[in-house]
Image: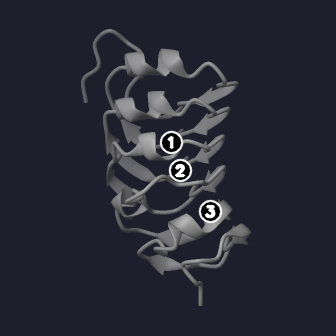
Amino acid sequence: MFHSTTNYATVDFSWNQMEGAIPSFLGNFNILFLNSNMFSDSIELLCPKTKAFVSYLDLSDNKLSGQFPDCWKDFEQLSILRLANNHFTGKLPTSIGTMKFIKELYIRNNSFVGEVPKSFENLTSLVILDLAYNLCHLGSAICTT
């Protein structure tokens, strides 16, 4: 269906009741809408083997779960990341702090714990950071589950 040598500007599969694993054509688009489906596998499948040229990634309102991967350094062009309303657990990875073009980061309503990584100070383009409704107050000095 998708050829590895083709780069698509926008792929919109939102609101389709897709389930199971996230499609593995990550390198073939600039803007991807996979929100409001029923994807339930780990997001580890999203970690690219090479640099990704994605600028907008929306995986909000799915059933994605597990540890949040620490592979965001490979998303150099990403400016908007929407992962809200899933079932992610654990601490936020420090590699998010390497995304120098990120302007909007929506990770509300998951199960993150701990402090916001110090590397987030490097997100100088960040305009919106939505961390609401996680298990505990991210950024607090002490956070227990």
Of the numbered discs 1 and 2, the one sitting upstream in the chain is 2
Q: Nearer the viewer, mark 1 or mark 3?
A: 3
Q: Which residue is mark 2?
A: 85
Corner quadrant of residue 114: top left
Q: Is residue 13 visible?
A: yes
User: Which residue type does callout 2 highlight?
Assistant: Asn
Measured in 3D between alpha carbons, the distance from the residue under mark 2 to the one under mark 3, in whole angstroms, is 10 Å
**Closer-to-camera residue (14/47):** 47
Label 3: element kind: loop
Label 1: element kind: loop
Q: Nearer the viewer, mark 2 or mark 3?
A: 3
Q: Are marks 1 and 3 in contact (CB under 8 Å)?
A: no
Q: Which residue is mark 1?
A: 109
User: Which residue type does callout 1 highlight?
Assistant: Asn
Residue neighbourhood size for the residue with mark 1, other residues' Cα within 10 Å, grouped as few (<14), some (14–19), many (≥20): many
Residue 96 point in image, percent of width and height: 45, 34
Q: Residue at x 47, y 70 (%)?
A: 39
Taking 82 as reference, is 89 left or right? left
Label 2: element kind: loop
Residue neighbourhood size for the residue with mark 3, other residues' Cα within 10 Å, grouped as few (<14), some (14–19), many (≥20): many
Q: Quadrant of the C terminus?
A: top left
Disc number placed over residue 35 in the picture, else none: 3
Q: Quadrant of the N terminus?
A: bottom right
Q: Residue at x 43, y 40 (%)?
A: 73
Residue 19 point in image, percent of width and height: 48, 78
